[in-house]
Every structure is written in C-alpha cells, then in structure tokens.
Amino acid sequence: MRVFERLFGWREIETRGEGAKRLTDYLLKENVPAEVISDGASTTVFVGAREAKKIGAYLKENGVEARFGPLRGLPALLSAAVLRPGILIGLVTVFLLFLFARSRVWEIKITGNGSIDEDKVRAALYEAGLRPGMRKKDVSGEAISSACLSNGELFSSVNVSLSGVTANVEWIGRSGEGHAPVSLESAGVNLVASCDGVIVAVEPSAGVAVVSPGQTVRKGDLLISGVTPGGTVRASGQVTARVSSEFRVTAALTEEIKTTVRHRPVAFSLRMFGEELFSFGGGEDASAYKEWILPGGVVLPFSLRVGYSTVTVTETVERTEAQAVENAFRRLGWIIREALSEGELLKKDVSGCFEGGGYTATAKTEYLINIAQPLAFDSRNEYNK
C-alpha cells in the first residue's frame, strides 16, 4: 500500500474460504494497491479508504461475507481530535509553539580568532542587541556589526548571519598592541583608513568628510570625523580608494601538512536557549565541539553539546615542479579572491620563480575598495580634539 494511502486513510478487510479468492482476484483485476496477509484459514488485506468502499460494494454484490476494520490514518486522528477537545487544543498549542519558536533566535554560535574571551564577546553582542529569544526579523547583522565595531577596544571585524533559529557570529579581534582598554569620553565615532591608498570618492552619510578625491592617505588617517558643529555623532559613509597590494604564495616541493582531527569525546553539556544548563566531563581538555538539537528542540530548544579532544596528524606531501607551480597559482588565486571579495580589481601583474625549495607566485594588484572603518573616541584619540 502506498504511503499516501496510509496517510489519508486505510481499512483492514478480512475474508475466509472462497471469499478470500474472490477478493484477491478483484485486487489483481482492478490493480488495487494493497498489502495482503494470508495464513491459510483467512486472508487480510489493507487498502485505502476509497478503495475499501468499492471492494465492499463488490463483495456485497457477490454475496461474500467480510469483516471491515475501522478507518485508520490521518482522517481518523482528526475525527478523534474533533470529538476530544483536549487533543485539538493540544495540537493547536504545539503548532503555535512551533511557529513561535521558528520565528526567534534561540542560539548564538560564536567563532573567532581567539584573542578575546568568549564571555566578553557575548557581553558585547548582548549590548549590541543580539540576544537569545529575540525575533529574527529584528536581527540586523549590519546594525549589530556597526555597534560592535564602534567599540574600538575589541573587534576589527564582526559578521552576523542567521541559519534557522541560530545566529552565527564570526569575529576578528584587534591585535592587542596599542589597543588597551580605555574609558570612552563620548559616544562619538570617527571613520579612519583601514589601509594606505589614494582617495577616489567620499560619500559621508553622517559626520564631516576631511579628505577629498585624489588625496593619498595612510592607514589610520581620519577620513570622516564624528565631530560636527552640532556635536559628536557616529560617523558613517563610504570612502572608496585605489589601493595597491602585493600577494605572495610559496608551494614547497616537499611539505609537511598538519591536520587537527577530533579524537574522542571528553565533555558533555545540556543547553537550552543557547545557554548551558549543566555539564560534566573534562571540559578543559576539549578543543573541538559538535552540537545536536534534541527531539522537540524546535519547540523547546534543548541541545546536547559534546567536546572532543584533538590530535594532530602530520602528512608529508611530495610535489613535482609542475604540481608546485599549479598549487602556488591556485592558492594565490584563492587569496586574491578572498582579499578582494568586497572590492573591484583594476590591475593584476602575476609572476613566479623557483626559490628555497619551492615555487613562489607573486601578484601585484591595484583595486578599488571601501577603506573606511569606525574608531570610537577615547582618551588617546587625537581626532577627539
């Protein structure tokens, strides 16, 4: 019997003796999809509800006695639900809870370069407005990223994306030197140059532009000031510059590749709404994690997080000269595409040579990119004066 026949209703029909032969002949003749069970004394078939009516009429016309079981499947469940208000209310409640849960963010997954404690990252995200239980339509990745970057002490890059009921946050922390925590003197924010370049266009949407097209700037130079005649603001806008960069990649003829792989589970934790309820095991030995949403987690988002110890596997790779050249240029292409994902490539001069036991590929590039990045006012910020 087909799956949809079971879903939309089916019945059991039992016959004996000559009636069993008449029934099976009818099923074969009319090509009726059915499951047939015979023990010698009786024959039982399972057919869709609609076919059961036709079979009943046929058996009645031919004087065959048969036992018809009750209607099964979804229609029977719905009938029972209508007759029992408690079941109907329960189904409606579960459905509404499902819709409610799917419309909100219940878990925040954080990945970064490890230069900042995760608790600090979560606190910064909370202050920026990203919290478990908030509606997904209220999550603005751009607004959260801007709020985090306005805190010049912690981040140089923050990216927020949604996947189901999970908010994925990827961040890069500042290097540390020259970025010691300081107390902010105001809520103002400047836009400064993220790298050296020649200004092509300046489009401020808040604040005052202090550079113009054709001007050469160095990394860290002020581009759009948050100090305006009306007071301090969060400067925003876009500053497009022509930037020159050189990319180099070396593919060794003999290379040891180290890969970190999961070894065995050492820690377990039960989480709800993205927050840990309890844990056990050697969490300090875990360096890789995997998380599963438990059954019913869509309505009440419980998840099991397992921490694994890891081992490093070393593999020695031998390359021919042709393979080294191909590998170097392929990797160089990946690096350039990633670096210029938000820019427009204007010029690329590529060269390469064998040196130091491998092949080095070099690309000198010129491209257009937005170099404006926010920097909060602080007690040492010269642009605050």
Image (cartoon, helix red, strand yellow):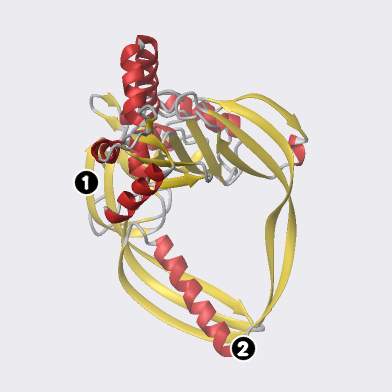
Q: Circle 1: is it few (<14), some (14-19), or many (20+) Cα within 10 Å?
A: some
353 relative position to 225: left or right: right
Q: Which mark is residue 203?
A: 1
> Quarter-wise, where is residue 86 in the image?
top left
Q: Amino acid at mark 1?
A: Glu
Q: Which mark is residue 320?
A: 2
Residue 29 image point, x, y percent: 28, 55
Q: Viewer-proximal residue, 157 or 76?
A: 76
90 relative position to 297: left or right: left
Q: Secondary structure at mark 2?
A: loop
Q: Quadrant of the C terminus?
A: top left
Q: Viewer-proximal residue, 137 or 61?
A: 61
Q: Secondary structure at mark 1?
A: strand
Q: Residue at x 59, y 89 (%)?
A: 321
Q: Viewer-proximal residue, 296 or 70?
A: 70
Residue 205 image point, x, y percent: 22, 38
Cβ–Cβ below 8 Å for labels 1 and 2? no
Q: Residue at x 41, y 51 (%)?
A: 194
Give the mark, 1 or 2, whose residue is nearer the N terminus: 1
Q: Residue at x 54, y 43 (%)?
A: 111
Q: Is residue 234 above or below residue 325?
A: above
